[in-house]
Image: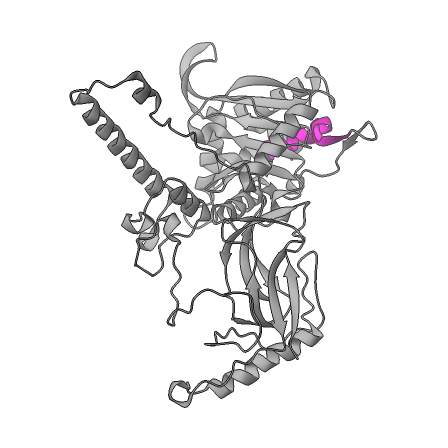
Amino acid sequence: MAQVLEFKLPDLGEGLTEAEIVRWLVEVGDVVAIDQPVVEVETAKAMVEVPCPYGGVVTARFGEEGSELPVGAPLLTVAVGATEAPAPPAPSAAPGSSADAPAAGESSAGSESGSGNVLVGYGTGAPAARRRRIRPERVGTPAAPAPAPVPEPVPVAVPAAAGEVSGQQGPVAVVSPLVRRLARQHEIDLRRLTGSGPDGLILRADVDSAIREAEEAARAQTRTAAAEPAVAEAPTAVAAAPAAAAERIPLRGVRGAVADKLSRSRSEIPDATCWVDADATELMAARAAMNAASGPSGGPKVSVLALLARICTAALARYPELNSTVDTAAREIVRLPGVHLGFAAQTERGLVVPVVRDAHTRNAESIGAEIARLTELARTGKLSPAQLTGGTFTLNNYGVFGVDGSTPIINHPEAAMLGVGRIMPKPWVHNGELAVRQVVQLSLTFDHRVCDGGTAGGFLRYVADCVEQPAVLLRTL
């Protein structure tokens, strides 16, 4: 006899308490194997596929795509032991259907022993022998109300609210849930867009362009209406005109996590900022020489960010006060033994801070390779929660946005952040003469509880000296 088991949203680690359903990977009536991914969820840290620890028939799903569920809330129910559908009539019997039943039976048998895999908060015993997904026409087990049957195969389709043309089916070339949500909020029909990404992939820039065109069309229509002869109306008619509704965007997911962390930083950390302009001409020349020495096939090029990261690790070795955190409960400053260097990265999902582990043990080339690897994972939304936590100091290169300076907000619970503006030609007094040099502004925001201005100024001055004269760094190598 089939046993109906409830699978709840597991603890995804790193203190996460909720997740947003991005995409269901199974339908009601599907046969699932042990540890088969059943839903894709987005947390404040990353996007992950959640595997189900039971094998059987999906009898109910809880939560629509785009909805948010707390940890411990039901995700779906599975009828364990009811993996075979009733035998269909002879004319519609598909060849090989009898061969599918044993495979489904194997999933059922595996569910009794379990999988042995663990996703932070749950796990089972031995692994299943086979992992298959079968979509029977009917499943002979009590189930929650299911959607109306659709002719097979069922194409993946975006809901009409997200931009689907009524009566059309088939996939829309959209990967990012942010793009789908943006289109849904602005009532943009994704099927009418031509994607500028690879293989016609619709990017956020395509949706933003469509939004601007729609707004411009609305403004043009308003101007046309205003140019027509006005009809005298009673004052009450003007008052009765509906006011434009303000757009409300929920603070959740990555945006909500950033808001919470920055608010906590501002409320708990008494921060201060100091800054200095530095002549980066010699640093840029040193970088060009390094990359030229490696030859055309001598390995990856060293980036400016990698050089600045290496300079930061050397500076933190001289000023360890800034590689620390404050234990408010114990009223203690905790100086950390190693440097786990975070760097700010802007992605379609928002601002994330991947962490280069043990940066104090790496050279500029190793740091650069790790930054490149983590940046690619951030771009594709594949960073794990562990790769986004545990930083001890953050480097923020906001110069990529074309700005010169900023006052960074400390990435709580760290004690400092170095901000780097754009490197650009400016008039500069060099060797007593006015010259055009490559100048950059460096900003250091620090926790005034861990040190005073003298320490912060010494750290920033050392970084600026290494930027202006890279040979200074050789003394610490």
Residue farthest along the right direction in this orientation: 330
Residue 324 is one of the magenta-drawn residues: yes
Displayed quadrant of residue 108: bottom right
Q: Residue at x 37, y 28 (%)?
A: 244
Name the dominant secondary structure of the magenta segment: helix
Which residue ends up furthest to the top in the rendered image? 432
Counting from the top left corner in percent of width and height, residue 222 is at 24, 27
Q: Tell how many labels.
A: 0
Q: Is residue 34 above or below residue 253?
A: below
The x and y percentages for residue 109 are 65, 79
The stretch of residues the image draws in magenta is 310-327
Left-right relation of 323 to 365: right
In the picture, the quarter occupied by the C terminus is top right
Farthest left residue in view: 229
Near-viewer residue (472 or 89): 89
Q: Does the magenta portion include 462?
A: no
* Residue 409 visible, this orientation: yes
Q: Nearer the viewer, residue 9 or 47?
A: 9
The N terminus sits in image quarter:
bottom right
In depth, the one of 279 and 88 nearer the eye is 88
Q: Position of residue 220 (x, y in %)?
A: 22, 29
Specify whether residue 129 is in view.
no
Q: Is residue 430 left or right of residue 1?
A: left
Residue 309 in picture, x, y percent from top left: 58, 35
